[in-house]
Image: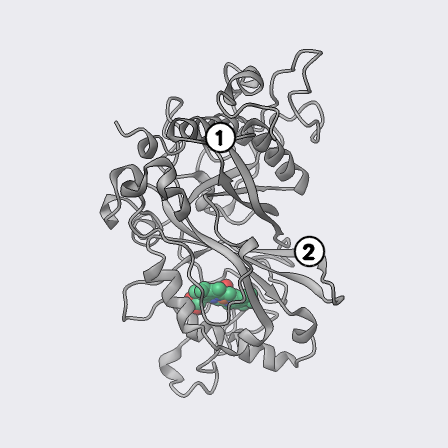
Amino acid sequence: MSPVPRRGFLHGVAAAALPAALPDPVPAPLPAPLAGRPPGPPPFHGRHQAAVLTPPARCTAFTALDVTAGNRAELAELLRTLTERARLLTAGRAPDPAGITAPPADSGLLGPDLAPRTPVSLTLSLGASLFDHRFGLAARAPRRLRAMPVFPDDDLDPAWCHGDLGLQLCADSPDIVLHALRDLTRHTRGAMQIRWRLDGFTAPPRPSGTPRNLFGFKDGIANPEVRDARLMDRLVWAGPHSGEPAWADGGSYLVVRLIRMRLEFWDRIPLAEQERILGRQRDSGAPLDGDREDDPPHYARDPKGEVIALDSHIRLANPRTPAGGDQRLLRRSYNYDRGVDAAGELDAGMLFCCYQQDPERQFAAVQRRLAGEPLTDYITPFGGGYFFALPGVRDGADWFGRGLVHPT
Ligand SMILES: C=CC1=C(C)c2cc3[nH]c(cc4nc(cc5[nH]c(cc1n2)c(C)c5CCC(=O)O)C(CCC(=O)O)=C4C)c(C)c3C=C
Ligand SMILES: [Fe+2]
């Protein structure tokens, strides 16, 4: 049982550790899509959570949690605490020292001087199960939020699926991610508990450009342009303009899929077959009818699939199909590596994450077309969930989910 009582978990250790004011962030390298903005980590306050549009970081941990808070007031307290800690952590700020008889205010993992070199980004999202009977929120749920269904070719393990909350932490190194997770769990003990967690990484671009997945192919090439704000309003952001409640304005649906990749099998097939399955050249990333990774594939010129096979991954996934609305997704995937399984096989794959305005119109429509594609012989989806990434925290008085839990 938790030594920290459920009620009032924010008061005491957490409240004592909160600083009165945060320092100005010091300039850090900007991801490409944010170039042109004033230097520094993405601001924490805003209409959207800052990390949704930023490119994948080097390291991540996706953690699904179950809320153990007993009522709506305790849920509100949990969300307020997560907001306060997120403000601190995303600014790379060390907590104030604890008294000599108290446990240290910080794990110490990053040394005594955190600020301001170690910013972490955090994205908080809600699962459909949070809207059950416990908190009286069913009538206020995001309209399109439901539990992740089972798709053909899935082999889902219930221990790796769903969750009341989804928490994604991203940073330059795994210790920064773990430091943030320890801080958050420590300050919310008694109100939420981890259900599952998968850590991921991206490779640095070699030699440049888009990073590669564990099959050796560049991944994330054909993503929508995040600098196009009107496009993001059509494809990524949800709110009253997409039929959602007012409190949800600026949020986004997040689909997470944990997909094991059978690396030993993949490594036994010829390169030409690998490229036929995916529809792109491995080394350059170009579509099989092009020369460069940013060349668009020309399916209309190849109706029989003689160059890019009709059942290749990119041709089936193609979200720019005229029927069924715009299905383009913002993919933000990571590689994962969990060592070896009991049979001595490599246990590695993809932590597939994508943001969208409508998971049925976008992710599910694409996923259904991929059923039975040749790639399915080399991959096994075993977990994940559907989540709603909350709108951003607007200012110093706001907190994650305030409009949901405390309507004004
Ligand atoms: C349902 C959504 C998708 C899943 C799940 C998925 C898994 C998956 N993908 C690769 C490798 C590649 N995917 C690529 C492109 C691509 N994939 C999806 C969707 C899902 N992929 C889309 C919508 C697209 C873009 C299609 C287009 O617009 O042309 C590519 C090509 C490079 C790129 O654009 O990123 C690769 C390579 C694997 C290995 C995988 C499961 C493990
Ligand atoms: Fe894909």
For residue 160, above or below residue 284:
above
| Residue 19 image point, x, y percent | 54, 16
For residue 93, above or below residue 279:
above
| Residue 192 image point, x, y percent | 52, 35
279 horizontally vs 147: left or right: right
Which residue occupies the foreground of this view, 269 or 288? Answer: 269
Name the residue rendered at 56%, 54% in the picture: 160
Name the residue rendered at 46%, 87% in the picture: 306
Which residue, given by chain and number where applicable, does mark 2 sit on?
Answer: 338
343 horizontally vs 272: left or right: right
Which residue, given by chain and number where applicable, does mark 1 sit on?
Answer: 82
Mark yes or no: residue 293 visible: no
Q: Where's the N terminus, which quadrant?
A: top right
State the image quarter where residue 182 is shown. top right
Please name the amino acid that badge 2 sits on.
Arg
Name the residue rendered at 30%, 49% in the picture: 233
| Residue 103 image point, x, y percent | 68, 19
Which residue occupies the foreground of this view, 226 or 153? Answer: 153
Mark yes or no: residue 351 visible: yes
Colouring: one colour
